[in-house]
Amino acid sequence: MELTQANIENPSPAVTVAAPAASAAATPPAIPIEQGNEYLEIRRSGIHGTGGYARKDIPNGTRIIEYVGERISKEESTRRCEADNEYIFIIDENIDLDGNFPWNPARFINHSCTPNCEAEWDEGRIFINAIRDIKKGEELTFNYGYDMEDYQDHVCHCGTPACIGYILAEEYWDKVKKRPDLVKRDQAAQNDKLA
Ligand SMILES: C[S@@+](CC[C@H](N)C(=O)[O-])C[C@H]1O[C@@H](n2cnc3c(N)ncnc32)[C@H](O)[C@@H]1O
Ligand SMILES: [Zn+2]
């Protein structure tokens, strides 16, 4: 399943790689890139695996970090998704972005049904922005915007009161009203798979 941004209005032409530029003259960043940036801190998450946290108070509207990676064709994206790559973002109808690289700490930001961030599509680039004031130490989250395909396989552990039970774009929530019995069943199936 690929991360999506619902409101893609003006897709840009493809470029090859959105890795950070290497420069011999550049001074190393104060925070090593794998560990985040001035706003983002990477550590173990209560939601899933590793997550992204607010390193300091973040005002609403702040552009926290760019989601960077390798720009790949849809064919290559399908191949990598089938190989269980969970870090692929849809850029437009031709290009996806594989963010599974150490220099993309944004890849650790988990999904929530009540997120404090959103993914912004800006001329073919993806940015993670705060959508409310965020306190230092809060886990950063955005809605992954997944569609209904195999949604039962994507049980949500965000733990927020409004959790719909699955990782899903809000437009599909009416179709999957929270059913604790179904969520429990799907959760158990997922745990069996992981065991
Ligand atoms: C882009 S990664 C996020 C980083 C991930 N926590 C890690 O340690 O690599 C996306 C994957 O994290 C997991 N994930 C993210 N948000 C989740 C949530 N709210 N509930 C359950 N799993 C979640 C899912 O397995 C998803 O495919
Ligand atoms: Zn949830």
Image: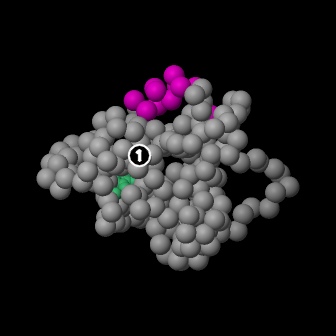
Q: Which residue corresponds to the image point at 20% horizontal and 47% vertical from the top-left?
A: 186
Ligand 2 has an atom within 8 Å of the beta carbon of the residue at disc 1: no
The vertical placement of 166 against 35, above or below, is above
Nearest the viewer among 160 and 19 is 160
Nearest the viewer among 114 and 16 is 114
- Position of 122 with respect to 130 (left or right) is right
Q: Which residues are magenta?
A: 71-82
Magenta includes 106? Answer: no
Magenta includes 76? Answer: yes
Dominant secondary-structure state across the stretch colored magenta: helix
Amino acid under disc 1: Glu
Residue 188 rendering spot, x and y as whole percentages = 16, 50
The vertical placement of 125 against 114, above or below, is above
- Position of 159 with respect to 15 (left or right) is left
Q: Which residue is mark 1?
A: 171
Residue 91 rendering spot, x and y as whole percentages = 59, 37
Q: Quadrant of the N terminus?
A: top left
